[in-house]
Image: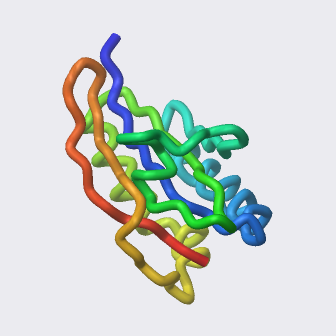
């Protein structure tokens, strides 16, 4: 069965990792409450900087940061669009976004359907 995946890679300052985890737990609940099949957050502990490409290179990782790779799984793109519309109006998510964090163009936010190459947009939420 084909599924639709939203994935992203973000740099997180090591000193802010606990705050990021709390935010991610709430975000995961919000997405799953609205119908996402899975919400996964993965913190790198031994990801090396590649010679040509790697997660650390993709976000221009600084020495005091770690990489977080996350993804949300949906049944389809249509379901993803419906769920994200609801999520963006959810008071729990709105509360987390106020005050709005600084936007910096270092992370990646690929959208991928299994078997189809991804389209990448840059977005990183920094604390």
Residue 17: x %, y % from top left: 74, 62
Q: Is residue 28 above or below residue 127?
A: above
Q: Is residue 35 visible from the viewing direction of this image?
A: no
Residue at the location (40% across, 76% down)?
104
Residue at the location (34% across, 58% down)?
85
Please count the marks in the image. 0
Please identify the quarter of the rendering in which residue 22 is found.
Answer: bottom right
Q: Is residue 77 visible from the viewing direction of this image?
A: yes
Q: Is residue 13 above or below residue 70?
A: below
Residue at the location (60% across, 74% down)?
96
Relative placement, left or right, of 17 versus 98 is right
Locate the N terminus and report the quarter of the image it occupies.
top left
Residue 61: x %, y % from top left: 53, 61
Residue 14: x %, y % from top left: 73, 64
Q: Residue furthest bottom?
A: 99
Q: Residue furthest top?
A: 1
In front: 1, or 52? 52
Residue at the location (59% across, 56% down)?
27
Q: Residue furthest front?
A: 51
In front: 95, or 59? 59
Residue 116: x %, y % from top left: 20, 25
């Amino acid at each position: 069965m084909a599924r639709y995946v939203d994935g992203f890679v973000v740099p997180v300052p090591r000193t802010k990792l606990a705050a990021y985890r709390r935010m991610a737990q709430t975000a995961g609940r919000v997405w799953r409450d609205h119908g996402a099949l899975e919400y996964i957050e993965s913190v790198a502990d031994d990801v090396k900087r590649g010679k040509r490409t790697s997660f650390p290179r993709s976000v221009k990782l600084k020495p005091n940061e770690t990489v977080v790779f996350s993804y949300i799984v949906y049944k389809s793109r249509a379901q993803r669009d419906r769920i994200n519309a609801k999520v963006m109006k959810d008071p729990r998510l709105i509360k987390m976004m106020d005050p709005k964090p600084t936007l910096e163009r270092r992370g990646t936010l690929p959208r991928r359907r299994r078997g189809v190459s991804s389209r990448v947009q840059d977005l990183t939420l920094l604390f």
